[in-house]
Image: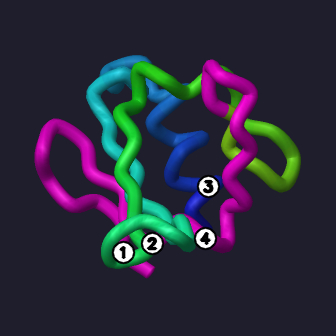
Amino acid sequence: MAKSVLDMILWHPEMDIKLSKITYIHRGTKGNLKTVAGEYINKLGRGFLILDEDTHIPYHRIIKIQYKGKLIWNK
């Protein structure tokens, strides 16, 4: 489901992926959560969100997607 929402943002003519924020489970950080700004998204892969620094985030770890500061998807 997270990939579908990210695809919608990416391909919608009136939306910009750079204005999104994605929160995901990142073990080892405080609270085990990390948030990344949409400007760092390089690609939406088949099973992973791929960031600029070649970091691969599995879609099943994404727990929240915000767009322009508003929550648009929550696991």
Residue type of the residue flagged with mark 2: Ile
Q: Nearer the viewer, residue 48 or 10?
A: 48
Q: Secondary structure at mark 4?
A: helix
Q: Which mark is residue 45?
A: none
Residues under numbered marks 4 and 1 in contact, where contact means CB atoms less than 8 Å apart:
no
Q: Main secondary structure of the magenta part?
A: strand
Q: Of residues 27 and 2, which is closer to you in this image?
A: 27
Q: Secondary structure at mark 1?
A: strand
Residue drawn at x 36%, y 22% as measured from the top left: 18
Which residue type carries mark 3? Ser
What residue is shown with label 2? 63
Q: Residue furthest left?
A: 69
Question: Residue 53: horizontal and vertical position, in percent?
Answer: 65, 22
First reached walking from the N terminus: tag 2 or tag 3? 3
Q: Are marks 1 and 2 in contact (CB under 8 Å)?
A: yes
How are the colours assigned in the image? rainbow
Q: Residues within 10 Å of mark 3 (few under 14, many from 20)?
A: few
> Where is mark 1, residue-wise?
74
Q: Magenta includes 34?
A: no
- Tell me: residue 55, above or below residue 1: above
Residue farthest right in this picture = 46
Tag in front: 2 or 3? 2
The answer to which of marks 1 and 2 sits earlier in the sequence is 2
Find the magenta span and give its range.
Answer: 51-75
Vertical order, 44 against 17 (above or below) = below
